[in-house]
């Protein structure tokens, strides 16, 4: 790792000031992506500003119409939270599928959403549930927030405070994990929020995306069979040593059908 | 440089460290606690697993400065007064190791698993130890050892 200065921020305000003062600074919370990146010398921040232990962004709050999860809440805390299990059980389940237990003990929701790894799990939930990414400056709709591989609507110095999830009627997530890394080769989150059905896909493309043909079909008929005749266009999907784009296209459909199958009875 | 105050295995330590020092290097090089191993150094293998404030973490993917004020437990804290911890006892009885390199991490991860789930099924053990790699055993005896450890901790003999 290159040298850097570590600063533990006492408040989000102070973190914002530090980011403004040091343009090459990076925020640190769990560090599950950032520290390996630094170890590989793929980044050279001058400062690491630690916001991981700020109490104000470590809370889970269930309100009448939404579930608000602080950016520094760990994946483990989401997975075992009674509020999350009650309001959006699929989200608790998704959190329990991320990485491994040690990673879930450190990694955070805000970190995952800010990083927007194309194979991360949380972006699929945030997009399918039509959640809002709350920063110190504004609320960003999920549809506007995710902008492709590691790209988001966040401006320089903008800090994710929490994610607001509207409460769905029902939701489910199915993931085909890479057997070694645990990352999604394809992960599909299906949510019914009010009259709307939203289907978000992670792991298969350059970034999380909605599968609108599936949304249309499921609005008419919420059953796995409704997707039988659909095919996913493989043109823009990822192709690498693990799977061809055609294989991933098929995985997306299979995962979507498995997610829809989980919805039965909810 | 930052001065860190960290409680390790019940003992308070105050040291000046470079900000980029990893917790595992602090434990091994500064404190001489070499029971915590560095396997892959890329957060894959779990050999460096220790307990920080009650949760199992990979100490190769945490900065020492992030453990400021924390309570850390390492493999050295498991045996007490010359008596093996039940998890160590179970790994011995069930031969849950061959070369032993991954064992400190396996034991610390098992401690975390059994804290959350005192009576895990085989499947829950396999998922619970997902973050730990063993390149010798094929895991069969490790799973047995964890089941035995759960029994021992629940008081069965």
Image (tube, coloured by chain):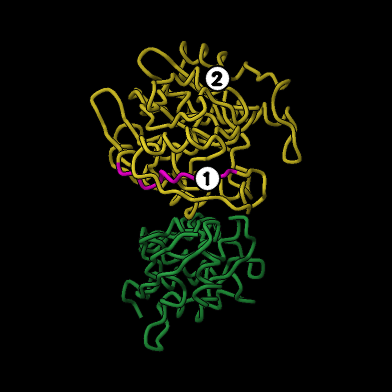
Please tell me which residue lies in front, B56 or B128. Answer: B56
Q: Look at the image and tell me in which quarter the C terminus of chain B lies.
A: bottom left
Chain that the image shows in green:
B
Chain that the image shows in yellow:
A
Q: Eyeballing the image, is A217 above or below A21?
A: above
Residue at 55% from the left image edge and 32% from the top image edge: A116
Q: Please, which residue is most extreme toward the front here?
A: A21
Chain under disc 2: A
Q: Is residue B123 left or right of residue A12?
A: right
Do the numbered discs 1 and 2 sit on residues whose CB atoms are within 8 Å? no
Residue at 41% from the left image edge and 23% from the top image edge: A131
Q: Is residue A231 left or right of residue A84?
A: right
Q: Eyeballing the image, is A11 above or below B54?
A: above
Horizontal and vertical percent for residue B155? 31, 76
Q: Which residue is mark 2?
A: A210
Which of the 4 image quadrants contains residue A119?
top right
Q: Secondary structure at mark 2?
A: strand
Chain under disc 1: A
Horizontal and vertical percent for residue A63? 24, 28
Horizontal and vertical percent for residue A28? 48, 44
Q: Please, which residue is most extreme toward the left here?
A: A64
Residue B5 within the segment the image draws in magenta: no
Q: Which mark is residue A47?
A: 1
Q: Secondary structure at mark 1?
A: strand
Bin the neighbour count of mark 2 within 10 Å (Cα to Cα): few under 14, some 14-19, many 20 and up.
some
Q: Is residue A240 left or right of residue A151?
A: right
Of pointers 1 and 2, the one earlier in the residue sequence: 1
Of circles 1 and 2, the one toward us is 1
Gap between marks 1 and 2, in whole Å?
36 Å
Magenta-colored span: A45-55
Horizontal and vertical percent for residue B62? 50, 56
Please tell me which residue lies in front, A162 or A238. Answer: A162
């Amino acid at each position: 790792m290159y040298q850097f200065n570590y600063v533990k921020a006492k408040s989000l305000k102070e973190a914002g000031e530090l980011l403004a003062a040091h343009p090459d600074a990076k925020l640190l919370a769990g560090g599950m992506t950032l520290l390996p990146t630094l170890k590989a010398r793929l980044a050279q921040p001058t400062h690491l500003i630690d916001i991981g232990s700020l109490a104000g962004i470590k809370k889970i709050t269930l309100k009448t119409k939404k579930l608000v999860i602080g950016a520094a809440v760990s994946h483990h805390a989401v997975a075992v939270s009674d509020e999350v299990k009650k309001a959006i059980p699929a989200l608790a389940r998704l959190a329990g599928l991320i990485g491994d237990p040690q990673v879930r003990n450190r990694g955070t929701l805000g970190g995952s959403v800010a990083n927007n790894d194309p194979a991360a799990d949380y972006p699929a939930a945030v997009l399918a549930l039509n959640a809002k990414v709350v920063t110190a400056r504004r609320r960003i709709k999920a549809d506007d927030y995710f902008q492709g591989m590691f790209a988001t609507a966040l401006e320089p110095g903008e800090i994710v405070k929490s994610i607001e999830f509207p409460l769905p009627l029902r939701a489910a997530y199915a993931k085909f994990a890479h057997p070694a890394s645990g990352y999604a080769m394809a992960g599909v989150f299906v949510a019914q929020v009010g009259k709307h059905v939203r289907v978000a896909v992670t792991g298969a493309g350059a970034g999380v995306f909605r599968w609108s043909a599936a949304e249309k079909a499921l609005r008419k008929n919420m059953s796995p069979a409704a997707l039988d005749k659909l095919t996913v266009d493989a043109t823009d999907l990822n192709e690498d040593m693990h799977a061809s784009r055609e294989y991933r296209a098929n995985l997306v459909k299979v995962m979507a059908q498995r997610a829809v199958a989980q919805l039965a009875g909810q | 440089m930052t001065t860190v105050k960290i409680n390790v295995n019940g003992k308070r330590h105050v040291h000046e460290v470079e900000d980029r020092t990893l917790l595992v290097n602090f434990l091994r090089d500064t404190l001489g606690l070499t029971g915590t191993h560095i396997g892959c150094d890329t957060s894959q293998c779990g050999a460096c697993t220790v307990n920080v404030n009650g949760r199992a973490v990979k100490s190769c993917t945490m900065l020492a400065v992030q453990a400021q004020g924390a309570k850390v437990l390492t493999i050295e804290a498991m045996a007490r007064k010359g008596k093996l911890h039940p998890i160590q006892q179970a790994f011995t009885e069930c031969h849950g190791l061959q070369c032993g390199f991954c064992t400190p991490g396996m034991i610390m991860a098992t401690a975390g698993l059994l804290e959350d789930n005192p009576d895990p099924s085989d499947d829950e053990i396999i998922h619970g130890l997902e973050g730990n790699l063993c390149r010798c055993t094929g895991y069969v005896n490790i799973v047995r050892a964890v089941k035995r450890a759960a029994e021992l901790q629940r008081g069965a003999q």
